[in-house]
Amino acid sequence: MDAVEVRNEFGTIRISDQVIAALARRVCLGISGIQAMDDSFSHGLPSVIAGDEAEGVRVNIKNNCAYIDVFIVVKYGIRVPSLALEVQEKVREDIFASTGAVVQGVNINVQNIDFQ
């Protein structure tokens, strides 16, 4: 399990990649236009974080920064570029506000469109 380290005058806080993934998933599911998170990508990737709370999210930690991949299902009729930008901004802001961890990149992977 990888972790981001946040240092302050009292010591070091280690935030696991699974915590970051769970936060990113929560943010994504709270955005209008996202129908679901898609975990079908996980079958071929060894670095996927297990657990329902992190479904549809992959986190890599490099140089004490988080790089996040989210895999989403978008509702039909939503403008994908605008939605993707909103997801990127909100995930970065929420994770930094909640943990102090720096998110260097948020990659959006639209896995499907829900036509219902």
Image: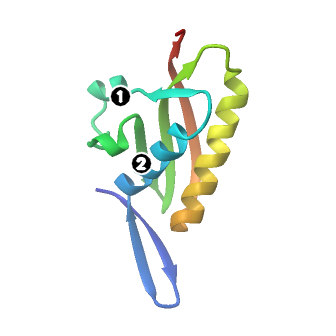
In the picture, which quadrant includes the N terminus?
Answer: bottom left
Picture residue at 62% right of the left edge, 33% below the top = 32
According to the picture, the residue beneath numbered tag 1 turns out to be: 39
Along the viewing direction, whichever of 76 and 42 lies nearer the viewer: 76
Q: Position of residue 12 (x, y in %)?
A: 42, 80
| Left or right side of 11 for 18 | left
Q: Position of residue 9 (x, y in %)?
A: 52, 90
| Mark 1 nearby-residue class (10 Å; few <14, some 14–19, many ≥20) | some
Provide the secondary structure element on which disc 1 rests. Answer: loop
Picture residue at 30% right of the left edge, 40% below the top = 52
Amino acid found under the numbered disc labelled 2 = Ala
Picture residue at 59% right of the left edge, 56% below the top = 94
According to the picture, the residue beneath numbered tag 2 turns out to be: 21
Q: Position of residue 72 (x, y in %)?
A: 49, 27
Amino acid found under the numbered disc labelled 1 = Asp
- Residue 78, quarter of picture: top right
Along the viewing direction, whichever of 16 and 33 lies nearer the viewer: 33
Gap between marks 2 and 1, in whole Å?
Answer: 13 Å
Residue farthest toward the front in the current orientation of the protein = 116
| Left or right side of 6 for 92 | right
Against 12, residue 86 (above or below) is above
- Please count the marks in the image: 2
Q: Position of residue 74 (x, y in %)?
A: 56, 22
- Residue 103, quarter of picture: bottom right
| Mark 2 nearby-residue class (10 Å; few <14, some 14–19, many ≥20) | many
